[in-house]
Image (cartoon, rainbow, N blue to C red):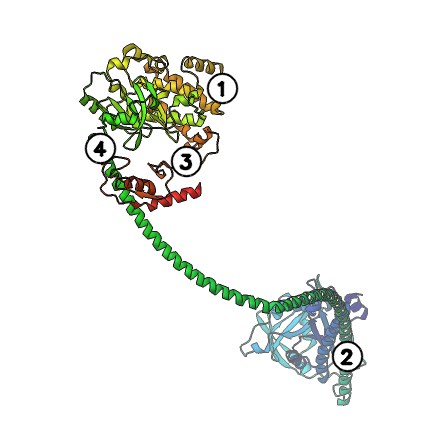
Amino acid sequence: MSGEDMIKAEGIRDVEDTVFVAVGKNVKEGKSVLSWALKSFAGRRICVLHVHQPNHLFSSKDGKLSGAKLKQHMVKACQELDRLRLHKLLNQYLLFISQAGIQGGKVWLEINNVERGIIHIIEEHKIRWLVMGAAAETHYSKQLSELKSSKAKFVCQHAPMHCQIWFTCNECLIQTRSMNNSLSSSLESLSSPEDNGGTKMRNHVGDGYEDLNILENASSPANKIVKAEIKGDYSPVHEAHLHCATSQPLLEEGSFHGKASSDERSRVEHAIMDAENSKQRAFEESVKRWRAEEDAMEAIRMAEVSYRLFKEKEDQRKEKEENFAKQKEEIEELKIQHDLCLNELQMIQEKKPVLESQITESSYAGKELEEKIIQAVGLLISFRKQRDEMQIERDNAIKEVNRFRKLEQDDADEYCIKNFFSISFSDIIEATRNFDPSSMIGEGKFGSVYKGIIHHVKVAIKMLPACGSFSDSDFQHKAESLSRVRHPNLVTLIGICSESRSLAYEFLENGNLEDHLACRKKSRPLHWQHRIRIAVEICSALIFVHANDPCIVHGNLRPTNILLDAKFVSKISDFGVHLLISQTENSNNDDPEASIYVDPEYIDNGQFTVESDVYSFGVILLRLLTARPASGIVRDIKCALESGNLGSVLDSSAGDWPIEQAELLAYLALSCCEKNPLNRPNMLSEVWPTIEPMREICKPHSDLNTSSQGSKGQKRIPPHFVCPIFQDVMEDPHIAADGYTYEGDAIKGWLYSGHDTSPMTNLKLDTCDLIPNYALYRAIQEWQQQS
């Protein structure tokens, strides 16, 4: 049922005679407005008008209660408490009215906007008379003549014109808004100053004031308090309830006379207070119940949390138990390991005395070693000192040797000029035993060769043709020039005899190359490595004599003039001999074998050139490869190379020839044997670069020598380790005054036999003192240890 229906149903017929007073929550200001109304409208029915603003805690923006934020029972309880407070406030105003002996009523509306709520009540109940505050009492002053409250301004502007409104402040009238003309007469009939004996008051309506006679003392008996309740809706947002009722049941039963006893008023007050207290207790019980429910829910939630915590603790406990079990197992294992360590420690402690004794012994041994080291250091220092002394002696000996060698060279040159070439004919006869045929070792184009001993030196004596166009002085001069040409691969010229036109050369024991190629005189064939080395040595000697100033051409180079010493080192003999005989004798050549080695160019013009020796070297090179006779050898090699069958013509007795090197030597030899001298290679720029690298594949002399004899080779003996007299490795080397080193027994025997000359130079020795050659002795010892 709407509020408008209830009003119509109940009917409020005395609204036109009722003065409505708008009050608020401030009881003091509300009573001030009521006091002015009671004084000004004595005897009139007074009705309290109140607009209540609901608690925002339970209202949403649309004015409806929000049950989504709070529980329903809590919302209801709070609403009930709010209503109790509202009624308590209104009852205080009604009690104040009743104490003045005036019938009172109450009308209220629940809405957020107070001023609009007042307008709505005025319109709904067609209120004609309304009293409300103009401003707060704090704004009051004697000069106050206008409205200060926004609510009062709004009501003054928007209230219906049939309603006259008095605005007061501090029990003083501030302003009046009068009704329209039709209503003014009703107001005048309502009260007049003469009838009611009231006082004149100034009423401000529009531009002026009206005097109103307000009855100060109402003579009417106690009026009945009208009990009415009006409910209605207002505002599109909120649902409002408008109530109009009497102050309390005690006031509703009839007229309440102003002179009622104080006991009755006390009972009414106590009844009201008891009702309020009952509602307050009910509300508190509801709150307690709600809190108990909340506590229960919280307890359930805490129980759930506790259960989860319990589960977590239980899981943690199980995990800790598992970890504890694992740790226990690990501890057990550690205990086992600890026991093992204890056992090992016990064993070590048992061995400790033994180890300590060993340490003690080691310390003693260390001390002994330290003493030995100190002794060894002392010995090392002494040995170093001795070594330094020996090095000094060696350096001195080397200096002496160098000095003697220099003296030897100077003396030898002087001897060659003055003494050594002056071999007498009687020495020649004595050496050859009067030219005994058994002493002859060879015969060639330039004469016969005998072996013999001159001045205790074994020599080969070459007897040149006696006839010739050279004088003795010319012969002597030319022989001296040849004696100055020295090379390791040239036979050394020792002396000459101008009287017999003979030359004395060093004697080489292993004969000539022809004997070994033809295997004559019980000579063994040479190994291919030995043959390559001989070719390199011949090439080196030819380059040397060709570079001599003046140039020396051999002119008779053939295997019989290539001699081999005890170590199978090849040496060229008869070089330059053609310079010591006449041209007629030089051109006389009855040996057809020898003519094969002669340059065809010489046969045509009779002149020896460097290219003549190149031709002869080419033929000798072919002989070394094949060991075949010289006749037709060039043709055979060419055919073998053209057919690619060089191996068929190589000398198999020399061993397995390396085909690559053999072909290279064959082509080189054929180029040397070209008939045109201009087509022959140069020995220095062409032949030597080709043949010299082959020296690396050749064995040492001693190995080649012994391999040709079919026995195991030994390491090559350095020439300066061999005694010039014994021709063997020295065991006690001594340096003589001539600068040469000899075996001690050999040189001493030489000197003790009455000789005062050098066995090597035949020069007179300055002294017969001998110096031990310690440096050479140590070198021989090291060499023997390595071999």
* Helix, strand or loop under label 4: helix
* Helix, strand or loop under label 3: loop
Residue contact at pointers 3 and 1, CB within 8 angstroms = no
> x, y percentage for residue 63?
70, 64
Q: Which disc is residue 281 wearing?
A: 2
* Cα–Cα span, label 3 and label 2: 140 Å
The mark nearer the N terminus, 3 or 2, is 2
Disc 3: which residue: 716
The mark nearer the N terminus, 4 or 3, is 4
Disc 1: which residue: 647
Residue contact at pointers 1 and 4, CB within 8 angstroms = no
Left or right for 200, reference 740:
right
Disc 4: which residue: 415
Left or right for 72, reference 595:
right
Mark 1: few/some/many CA within 10 Å (<14, 14-19, 20+): some
* Cα–Cα span, label 1 and label 4: 52 Å
* Cα–Cα span, label 4 and label 3: 32 Å
> x, y percentage for residue 92?
71, 80
Looking at the rendered structure, the kind of residue marked 4 is Tyr
Left or right for 27, reference 75:
left
Mark 3: few/some/many CA within 10 Å (<14, 14-19, 20+): some
Residue 345 image-quadrant placement: bottom right
